[in-house]
Image (tube, helix red, strand yellow):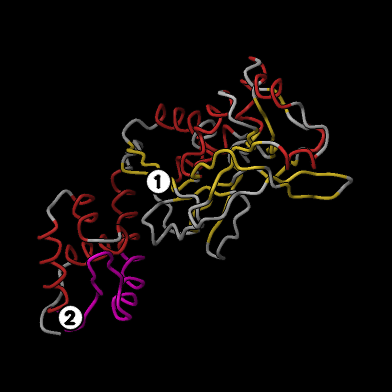
């Protein structure tokens, strides 16, 4: 090795990997892409190995680059935690909290939690990264994640966040029901217009119902397909009469009370486990620990 690499250069290398490119890393770090590119070239020269494979559309790590990233990322996380501990040693929680969450928790579960958290810890900057796929939160540079029934790695711990159980409801506007009739059985849905959500990978989310003690899947006619990243906006289309929507019941309750939506096939609705907050069993800095405490207190989980 010609020269000992600068820790700042190593941080920039991680930022390029986590952001997916030079331009995104530059925006994240508040600099220009040319500086990022120069830094990576200098780092590769110092180490004597290529770290990144570049194309006009993407950047990914070489084998040597991935091995380096896997080894240095925990070191920087440990250093950030130590700095946060020192900054918070006088009792005021400071720093940054980054949460990787699915769109399903954005409309109603997160707002009251974050409002209370910010009331107690106003000097913490909170960032919400909406991602509906299963994510390695450490590689993504996030402190914690929220998922529904996700399989967790052995070095992760989790706690319930929000409702313990959630119902999958079907709903439509009164105008839609008047024009198209009220479904009386799950099979009727195959002849109705559906407002569907599509995962980033291309799969349409299924409508699951419970009939005769068994789970069944129903495929309606797709009148409108919405990216799951825009999940919180789907009810507006149902209110407008475009079709029947499948959504969590707690999203629909206000509309049910107001009469802007009506329940469809309620006896057949499925109940699922609610979301969970998950995080590494180590490197839990003060901002994350304070958020865990807030979630436990508001969810009645204090021990």
- Label tally: 2
For disc 1, the marked residue is: 129
| Residue at x-position 64% and y-position 23% | 173
Q: Which mark is residue 53?
A: none
Q: Quadrant of the C terminus?
A: top right
Is 138 positioned to the left or the right of 39 in the image?
A: right
As helix, strand or loop, the secondary structure at mark 2 comes to: helix
Is 174 positioned to the left or the right of 132 in the image?
A: right
| Residue at x-position 20% and y-position 60% | 22
The residue nearer to you, when weighing 230 against 221, is 221
| Residue at x-position 56% and y-position 55% | 203
Query: How many residues crowd mark 1 within 10 Å: few (<14), some (14–19), many (20+)?
Result: some
Q: Which residues are magenta?
A: 46-75
Per the model, the C-alpha gap separating discs 2 and 1 is 33 Å
Is 299 positioned to the left or the right of 13 in the image?
A: right
Q: Position of residue 164 (x, y in %)?
A: 67, 39
Relative height, residue 298 to residue 255 (above, below): below
User: On the image, which quarter does residue 287 sit in?
Assistant: top left
Q: Quadrant of the N terminus?
A: bottom left
Q: Is residue 63 magenta?
A: yes
User: On the image, which quarter does residue 79 sit in?
Assistant: bottom left
As helix, strand or loop, the secondary structure at mark 1 comes to: strand
Q: Position of residue 177 (x, y in %)?
A: 70, 24
Q: Is residue 16 magenta?
A: no
For disc 2, the marked residue is: 47
For marks 2 and 1, the one nearer the N-term is: 2
């Amino acid at each position: 090795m010609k020269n000992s690499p600068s820790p700042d250069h190593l941080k920039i290398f991680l930022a390029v990997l986590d952001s997916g490119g030079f331009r995104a890393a530059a925006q994240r770090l508040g600099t220009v892409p040319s500086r990022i590119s120069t830094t990576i070239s200098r780092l590769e020269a110092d180490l004597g190995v290529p770290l990144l494979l570049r194309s006009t559309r993407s950047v990914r790590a070489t084998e040597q680059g991935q091995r380096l990233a896997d080894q240095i990322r925990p070191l920087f996380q440990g250093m950030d935690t130590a700095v946060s501990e020192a900054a918070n040693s006088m009792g005021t929680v400071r720093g940054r909290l980054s949460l990787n969450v699915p769109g399903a928790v954005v409309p109603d579960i997160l707002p009251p939690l974050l409002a209370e958290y910010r009331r107690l810890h106003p000097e913490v900057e909170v960032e919400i990264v909406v991602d509906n796929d299963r994510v390695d939160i450490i590689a993504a540079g996030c402190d914690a994640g929220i998922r529904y029934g996700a399989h967790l790695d052995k070095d992760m711990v989790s706690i319930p966040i929000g409702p313990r159980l959630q119902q999958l409801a079907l709903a439509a506007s009164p105008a839609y029901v008047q024009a198209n009739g009220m479904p009386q059985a799950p099979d009727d849905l195959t002849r109705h217009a559906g407002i569907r959500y599509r995962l980033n990978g291309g799969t349409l989310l299924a409508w699951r119902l419970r009939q005769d003690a068994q789970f069944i899947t129903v495929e309606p006619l797709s009148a409108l397909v919405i990216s799951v990243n825009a999940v919180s906006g789907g009810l507006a289309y149902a209110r407008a009469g475009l079709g029947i929507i499948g959504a969590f019941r707690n999203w629909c309750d206000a509309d049910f009370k107001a009469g802007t939506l009506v329940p469809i096939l309620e006896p057949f609705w499925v109940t699922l486990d609610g979301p969970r907050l998950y995080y590494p069993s180590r490197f839990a800095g003060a901002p994350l620990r304070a958020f865990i405490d807030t979630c436990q207190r508001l969810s009645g989980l204090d021990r």
